[in-house]
Image: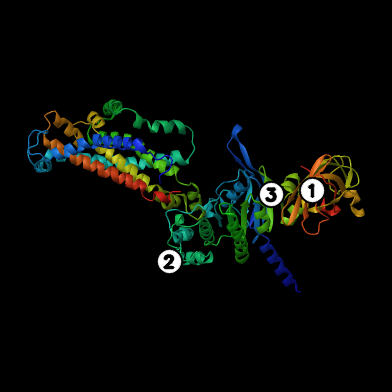
Amino acid sequence: MSGITEPRGWTKGALAATSWLVYFFFYAPILVLIIFSFSDSRNASVWGGFTTSWYSDFASDSELTGALWNSLRIAVVATLVSVVLGTMSAIALERFRFRGQRVFDALLYLPVIIPDVTMAVMLLLFFAQAANWFGFSKGFGTIALSHIAFCISFVSIVVRARLAGMDDKLEEAAMDLYASRWQAFRHVTLPLIMPGILGGGLLAMTLSLDDVVITQFVTGGGWSTLPVYVFSLIRKGVTPLINAVSVVMLVASMVLVALSLLAQRLRGDDAI
Amino acid sequence: MTEAGVAHVDVEEVATTVDAVAIRGVTKRFGSGDGEVVAVDDIDLSIADGEFFAMLGPSGCGKTTTLRMIAGLEFPTSGSLKIFGDEVGTLPPNKRPVNTVFQNYALFPHMTVLDNVSFGLRMQGVDKATASGRASELIDLVQLSGMEKRKPSQLSGGQQQRVALARALVNRPKVLLLDEPLGALDLKLRQEMQLELKSLQRDLGVSFVFVTHDQEEALTMSDRIAVMHDGRLLQVGSAEELYERPANRFVADFIGQTNLIEATVADGDMIVLGNGSKVLAPSDYAAGTPVAMSLRPEAISIGTRGSVPAEHQADSLDGVVSTAVYLGHALDYHVSVDWIDLEVRAPAVGSRGRFQPGDEVSVWWDRSSNWVVAD
């Protein structure tokens, strides 16, 4: 595997050193965070001996666990709805030709590129108007709707990439072999894009669980998700409790991202 | 023979003369307005039951679109399409008694060979055990026993081809459609599969409709061949008919190699060649029609200048050899006659001498081997 493009001599060393530096820069803070989440000291940045009490504090703090429960419920709802809608829009954009397709295509990806805070303000104004007209209060519903709104785009992108790599003759072959349109989708298309759907769904769940900015704008009535609650705790001072909560969120996110990558690689060699 | 007996024969005649596929005045347009493309332009075609039928033409000629309309993957813009007497014009593919072997096979990558082959039966509601049993029979038939549990990606191109064949045939289609099925195989495998497909078709007695751009493949395998060009059906006939009596200039040129010598129809079965010489070449074209005389390279004899046998004097030309290529079984010459260049293929054995570039020669042909074509 040592082709002409393989780096050699001092370039090789320099590239390796740069890579290690970048990784150090990424992961040193995480390591520090994890270490200090076990520190037996009120001050978050002073080491005071090993303890796991911050984790048990987290488990027994009803406000924290309540916020965690909120986060999970919203993440599950946002993921399920955005997976269905995102997959449907991906199929529509990839498989059919219709009027206004390009516009629809561009608009669908807008939430990916516009800044979170812009999106948050937009949604806040929108919900304020809607509340005037329809009379509902902000909270679970508004947060879930907002998360669905930005998750659809990500799901759609991931599923579409998978669909684009799939031979559309396969559906024709299924229908030629007596499958109805639905059966062709169910037995051929769906299994083949499933890694994309799973990957997109896990990505959506990660984004929903981690979101602070948008959630903070559209929440109300004392409703809070875990990241938003943690953010509010910081104003009272950083304790190792926050370190422990952060570690839990970090691990959860990393597990989800890893699962997402795994799902996308699943059966990847078979997708013609 | 009694009257009843005669009547009985008549009934059988009627029953067996229903075409497997009957296409009447079918046109297919794609797009609209300025972007409109006529892929298939008002074609009529009858494919008999049990026939090996090839649709031949260059890419973009409409042969694949025609096949897809028979399969139900495209619907005709206008015209009638019947399969065994039933109008199927806008019936979806899953409601038609035909199955397709796709170009590049379109095997389901997430299913095993067995699941691929039993798919059609399962979709028709056949229970799993029966479907697997019949699928296994077909897998045996295409000589892939032992490969049932493999995924398509673990098979060679030739094996994938066989799976595609088994997957279609397991449903006992009344017509099997094949879209360039051998295109992805290398030459040797392709020739083997040609013979296998032909004998399989003979054993099953099912109509095969075969789309190809390879004229040799069409000539080797088919009972009849339809030549298409620019969405139009130019000629339908046996290999011999197409080769010996092409309907027009395109068919003459597309099927095999030929010399097309520009000419004009004169009176009395004569045509006037470009150099003014008159040649006897009967045709149905009116006097004055611009035509071409098709002469196959192997139908032309070559000899030293002045050696033309007396009976061929009227059908000969003088020229100079410009190139000579040794092909093993034959010698391929290009002979410059004053206004054209003729390709001549002389058998390596039994020719009247061999010639070098620059040699002055005469060429002549048998009167029955020329054929007049118009546009």
Which quadrant of the structure image shows residue B151? bottom left
Asked if A137 appears above or below B216 in the picture, the reply is above
Which disc number belongs to residue B227? Answer: 3
Chain at numbered mark 1? B
**For the residue labelled by badge 1, is the local secondary structure a helix, a strand or a loop?**
loop
The three-letter code of the residue at mark 2 reads Ala
Count neighbours of disc 2 (C-alpha within 10 A) and say few if under 14, some if 14 to 19, many if 20 or more.
Answer: few
Instruction: Give the image location of residue B122, x and y in percent.
Output: 45, 60
Asked if the residues shown at circle 1 and circle 2 are in contact, with their CB atoms under 8 angstroms apart, the answer is no
Instruction: Give the image location of residue B232, x and y in percent.
Output: 68, 44
Nearer to us in this view, B27 or B165: B165
Chain at numbered mark 3? B
The three-letter code of the residue at mark 3 reads Val
Q: Distance between the residues labelled 1 and 3?
A: 38 Å
The three-letter code of the residue at mark 1 reads Gln
Q: Tell which tag, 3 or 2, sits nearer the viewer.
A: 3
Instruction: Give the image location of residue B202, x and y in percent.
Output: 63, 64
Count neighbours of disc 1 (C-alpha within 10 A) and say few if under 14, some if 14 to 19, many if 20 or more.
Answer: few
Residue assigned mark 2: B129
Instruction: Give the image location of residue B241, x and y in percent.
Output: 75, 55
Asked if the residues shown at circle 1 and circle 3 are in contact, with their CB atoms under 8 angstroms apart, the answer is no
- Residue A161 seen in render: yes
Nearer to us in this view, B237 or B307: B307
Number of labels in the image equals 3
